[in-house]
Image (spheres, rainbow, N blue to C red):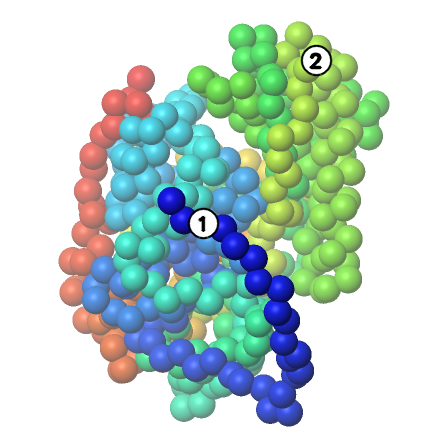
Amino acid sequence: MTEATITTATKIVQRPATQKTWDVDADICVAGAGISGVSAAIEAARLGRRVVLVDSLPALGGQAVNSIIGTFCGMFHNGPDRYQFTYGIADEILNDLGASGDLYYLVGPGWTTVYYDEVALGRWIEEAVREAGIELVLGANVRGASFENRRIGELDISTRYGDVRVRADGFVDASGDAVLAWLAGLPCREAADQPIFGTQMVVLENVYMDKAPSRPELAAVLSEKASDYGVVREDGLAFFFEGKDTVALNMTHMETPLEPLAASQMGLEGRAQTRNAVEFLKAEFPDCFKDASVRAYGFPGIRQTRWIKGDYQLTVEDVRSARSFDDAVARTAWGLEIHNNKHRLYWEGFDKGPHVHQVPLSAMTSPDADNLVAAGRCIDGDVAALSSVRVMGPCMAMGAAAAQALDLAGSGSIHQIDMAALKERLHDNLERKDYRDEASP
Ligand SMILES: Cc1cc2nc3c(=O)[nH]c(=O)nc-3n(C[C@H](O)[C@H](O)[C@H](O)COP(=O)(O)OP(=O)(O)OC[C@H]3O[C@@H](n4cnc5c(N)ncnc54)[C@H](O)[C@@H]3O)c2cc1C
């Protein structure tokens, strides 16, 4: 047995005149450790690349884990032919969290969504990143990006422990807000004439699941009585996790401005709205919620803020018409889910027959940059098209595509890679059709 002892000595330390900067060299740098960035980093590391993954949170998993998003959408074809669209880490997560009882498949009339336990997902990501040997710089805000001769050269990063410079051949912008493109001075897009609302997610425990209202029942009462309780959003959702006594509430709508002071206030606005939503549930559905209490608040959930201006902008017509692209790298069938109204979202599903729409690589690259690929919710689409492809199934596929494309580009240009070779590498995410028992009623 080791014996515990104490020492009492202290030493004087003082800020030196010149501050140390930590330098990191990598083949591929991924900015943003959300589900798209994690997918990109793991895929690139498994290709043998030296990868550095940077995030301003002191944790991995971005919104998927830390905002407690709660469900994977866009991962399966709509009914009745519910095959899986995305493989790679998506497949591993479904296998591993399924085996540990941390998933619940909600097979809806058209779509299939997969509820996950966010703690289990967080641990899965941490172990996968560790095993892949990825260099991490967490709690690290990217505040500058050098840009010369069409290439990002290095990132200037501040952490609470000092500054870090990261140099790499290729960069993945998985920041959600197109931070790398923005800091490099590249043109970016925002919604022109409407806010896209975010949501403060909250998890309640001690919920009586056998008394849970059905989706239509909750929708009807909420629609009628939301304003009686000061609930702003009249079409909120509750994700009842069967087999547990918890429910994740997606019942608020607050703006998510790209401005430091207002952005800081929005979290409080979201929590205030949450309090009203909980009061509503307890009063209107007491059998289910009378003993419920808040187990966890996520960080404010941000849907669409600023994104890259790509070589191509995915349009709502592309999505509706299920257009095929020669440079397709990801697919989904998730509907248009536009949170542009404080009270209600706009939903247009594609579940009346076979429908698969695609994400082209050209919506992930900038015409002005040769070593930058965006992935996730900051790729180029119009407001409606982006609302569909920013869900987590296609986000993981985009992350994998970004890694493979930058691997092929090496120190050359992303615009000159062998597209046939890329599509061969992404075969599973474009062509494979596996079925899962849980997703096939
Ligand atoms: C409330 C809400 C509910 C949703 N519901 C669903 C759902 O049920 N199912 C589904 O599939 N999708 C859902 N979505 C969409 C989906 O969750 C997101 O679009 C997806 O998680 C985005 O992943 P990402 O990796 O692109 O970005 P994020 O998860 O946002 O990750 C971006 C990362 O970049 C980091 N970052 C940003 N700026 C900097 C900087 N300057 N320096 C360093 N790091 C930086 C951030 O800290 C963050 O970790 C929902 C979204 C919201 C907001």
User: Between disc 2 and disc 1, whose residue precedes?
Assistant: 1
Q: Taking 225 as reference, is 179 left or right? A: left
Local SS, label 1: loop
Label 2 residue SS: loop
Q: Where is 26 relative to 189, above or below?
A: below
Depicted 200 relative to depicted 41: above or below: above
Q: Quadrant of the C terminus?
A: top left
How far across and how far down the image is residue 127, in percent?
34, 49
- Using the rendered image of the protein, determine whether residue 305 is visible from the camera's viewpoint: yes
Q: In percent of the image, x 32 and y 43: which residue is there?
A: 90
Residue depicted at 43% across the width and 78% down the height: 166
- The dot on residue 290 is 2
Q: Is residue 64 left or right of residue 256?
A: left
Query: Quick check: 230 left or right of 84?
Result: right
**Callout in the foreground (2, 1):** 1
Residue type, mark 1 in image? Glu
Q: Which mark is on residue 352? A: none
Residue 101, placed above or below residue 419: above
Q: Determine the residue positioned at 44% across, 33% down.
A: 116
The x, y position of residue 48, in whole percent, is 21, 67
> In this orientation, does residue 339 appear?
no
Q: Which residue is mark 1?
A: 3
| Position of residue 353 measured from the top left corner of the image (x, y, whole percent) | 34, 30
Which amino acid type is marked by label 2? Lys
Q: Position of residue 133 (x, y in %)?
A: 30, 62
Marks 2/1: CA distance?
50 Å
User: Dividing the picture into quarters, in which one does residue 327 lie?
Assistant: bottom left
In the drawing, does residue 333 fall left or right of residue 193?
left
The quarter of the picture where the N terminus appears is top left
- Which of the pair 382/174 is nearer the observer? 174
